[in-house]
Amino acid sequence: MKATKKLILVLLAGIVIALASCAVAPKTFFSFDDSLPENQASAFIVPLADFTITSYNGILVEWKGKGGIVSLNYCEITIPAGETELVFNIHYSRGDGYSRWTTTGKDLVLSYKIEAQQRYLLHYTGGENIFIYTMEPDEKITMSVLKREHGTIKIGDL
């Protein structure tokens, strides 16, 4: 009986480690201009469960996902390089089985100069900062991306 319990624990630990180390690639894609040449384009990668983009440079858009309790679903938004203003809503909700915390914000503005042929990952973990990580063109989202240097945008207490 003890051997069976140990085997089950080892298998569960292996599954957890395997899932935690998986790379995530965006599953939903939005493009502001399909005719945009690749050398003039850049991309924002956004977690769909947390962000809804409502405006891009003053133009109304609806770039959002289905959300969900647990979502590894990211979207990649291709836009022209240059000065960029994104207006978005955030609904960030996490829990640990005993408690749940939620952060919401509406009509938050992100102004950022983006470079051509770059990918930017927006990452939010609660609090008053959104982190922006630069990624390689074909790079997947991994823990190593989240450990590198990044930009921080303070959005204040929501």
Image (cartoon, rainbow, N blue to C red):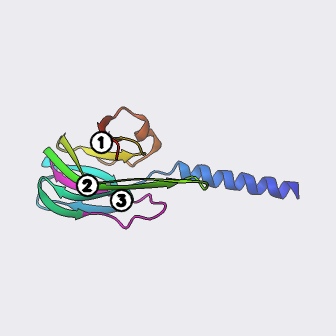
Secondary structure under the numbered disc 3 in the rendered image: loop
Secondary structure under the numbered disc 2 in the rendered image: strand
x and y percentages locating residue 10 in the rendered image: 73, 51
* 155 vs 95: above or below: above
The residue at the far bottom in this view is 66
Q: CA distance from mark 2 to mark 1?
A: 12 Å
| The stretch drawn in magenta includes residue 15 | no
Residue 155, numbered label: 1
Residue 48, numbered label: 3
Secondary structure under the numbered disc 1 in the rendered image: loop
| Quadrant housing the N terminus | bottom right
The residue drawn where x is 28% and y is 45% is: 120
Residue that numbered label 2 is attached to: 88
Q: For marks 3 and 1, give the one nearer the viewer.
A: 1
The type of residue carrying mark 1 is Ile
The residue drawn where x is 40% and y is 42% is: 127
- Relative placement, left or right, of 69 versus 153 is right
Q: Residues within 10 Å of mark 1 (few under 14, many from 20)?
A: some
Tally the numbered discs: 3
| The stretch drawn in magenta includes residue 75 | yes
**Whether residue 127 is visible:** yes
The type of residue carrying mark 3 is Leu
Q: Which residues are magenta?
A: 63-80
